Image (cartoon, rainbow, N blue to C red):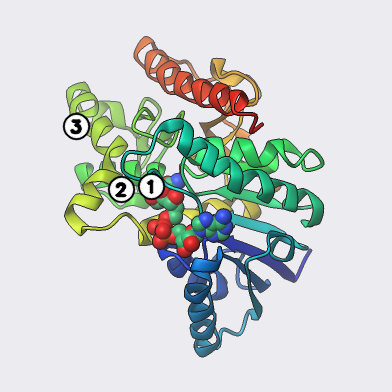
Amino acid sequence: ATTLATVTVTGAGGQIGYALLFRIASGQLLGPNIRVRLNLLEIPAGLAGAEGAALELQDAAFPLLDAVTVTDSAATAFDGANVALLVGSRPRGPGMERADLLAANGAIFGPQGAALNAGAASDIRVVVVGNPANTNALIAAAHAPDIPRERFTALTRLDHNRAVGLLAAKLGVPAGDIDGVTIWGNHSATQYPDLSYATAAGREVRELVDDEWVREEFIPRVANRGAEIIEVRGSSSVGSAASATIDHMYDWVNGNRGRWTSVALPSDGSYGVPEGLISSFPATSVDGAWRIVPGLDIDAFARQRIDASVRELATEREQVQALGLI
Ligand code: NAX
C-alpha cells in the first residue's frame, strides 16, 4: 500500500479548490495514514489564488502534507498522480451557446486527459467536478486510451448528499440513518433522485412519505438545489461541493462497507443506459472499484425519468463528437 500519494487538484485557486485543499491536507481524502503531495493546477489568471492557498497550507503545518506544487502546466501537475480532482472548468457564461460551452471545455479536458494518460500513476482515479461534469469526464477519458475507462468518474455525490440531507430533515432522523438513495443520470436539472429503495434506520422510506411529496417537492428541490443555494447565499455551493468530492474519493479508495451511494461512471449498459455514457448510478465501493448495484426493478415512473436524463447525456455526447472533441 502507498504511504505517500500524489493528489492533483485543478482549479485549485478557485472557491471549491480552497475548501478542498485543507481537507485533503488534513488527511480526510485518503485517510490518516497516507501522506500527501499536492499538485495545484491553474490557468495563469488563477495562479495567485493557488499560490496564496499554498502559503496558507504551509501555515496550517499539516503533519501529513509532504509538498505543494503550484503550476499552470498539466504535464507537471499530473506527473505521478494517484488521484485527480478536476474542479477547474469553463462554466456557462451569460449568452453562451451550448456548443461554445462544450468546445471551451473540450479545450480543457482533452489536453488534461492526454496529460493524465502520459504521466499519471497506474492506479490513477479521476473525478470531474467542473461542469458539465459528466461530459467533461467523457472527453478526458477519450484522450486517455491507456487508462482504464472506469477510472474516470464525475461527481453526483453532491446531489446524492443533498437528497439524503433533505430526506433526513423531512423524517427528523440523522443523515447517517438513510441508505438506498440513488441519483440517476446527468448532474443537471434532468437528474432523477430516486427514493424507491431508500431506507431510514432500516424502515422503507416509501411507507414514511407520500408519493406527492416525493414527486412535487423532493425531486425538484434536489434537482434545483444548486440554484436555491445561489439564491439564498448569493454564491454557488462551495463547502458542500468540496465535502461531496472528499466523500466520493474517500469511499472509492477505502470502500464504503456496502452502503449505497451515487456515482457518475462509464455505463456498462446496465439499466438500459447506453454503454460508455458517463451516467449516475447507485453504486457501492468494493476492493477499490465502484460496483453498480445490480438487479433493481425500475418502475414506469423511474424509467421515464432515467431515460430523459440519459437522452440529455446522449445528446451531449453527439455534440462533442460532432465538434471532434472525442
Ligand atoms: P471558481 O470559478 O471559483 O474556480 C474555478 C477555478 O478553475 C478558477 O480559479 C479558474 O482559474 C480555474 N480554471 C479554469 N480553467 C482551468 C484550467 N483549464 N485548468 C486549471 N484550472 C482552471 O469556481 P468553483 O466555485 O470553484 O466551481 C468550480 C466548478 O465546479 C464549476 O465548473 C462549477 O460549475 C462546478 N460545480 C460542480 C458541482 C457538481 O456537483 N459536480 C457542484 C458545485 C459546482 O457548481
Residue at left 77%, top 43%?
147
**Residue 6 sits above or below residue 272 on the image:** below
Observer-side mark, 2 or 3, equals 3
Gap in angstroms between the C-alphas marked 2 and 1: 6 Å
Q: Nearer the viewer, residue 278 or 209?
A: 278
Read off the residue under disc 1: 161
Q: Are marks 2 and 1 in contact (CB under 8 Å)?
A: yes
Gap in angstroms between the C-alphas marked 1 and 3: 16 Å
Residue at left 31%, top 35%?
223
Read off the residue under disc 3: 217
How would you rate the neighbour count of disc 2 (Cα within 10 Å): few for under 14, some for 14-19, many for 20 or more?
A: some
Residue 168: % across, % down: 27, 46
Q: Quadrant of residue 63?
A: bottom right
Read off the residue under disc 2: 165
Residue 128: % across, % down: 55, 47
What's the residue type where badge 3 is placed? Glu
Gap in angstroms between the C-alphas marked 2 and 3: 14 Å
Residue at left 47%, top 15%?
297
**Residue 229 sits above or below residue 144 on the image:** below
Mark 1 residue's CB less than 8 Å from ligand 1: no
Residue 122: % across, % down: 81, 52
User: Seen in the image, is 306 located left or right of residue 163?
Assistant: right
Q: Secondary structure at mark 3?
A: helix
User: Seen in the image, is 194 located left or right of residue 233?
Assistant: right
Q: Secondary structure at mark 2?
A: helix
First-in-chain label (2 vs 3): 2
Tell me the quadrant of the picture where the N terminus can be found: bottom right
**Residue 97 sits above or below residue 321 on the image:** below
First-in-chain label (1 vs 3): 1
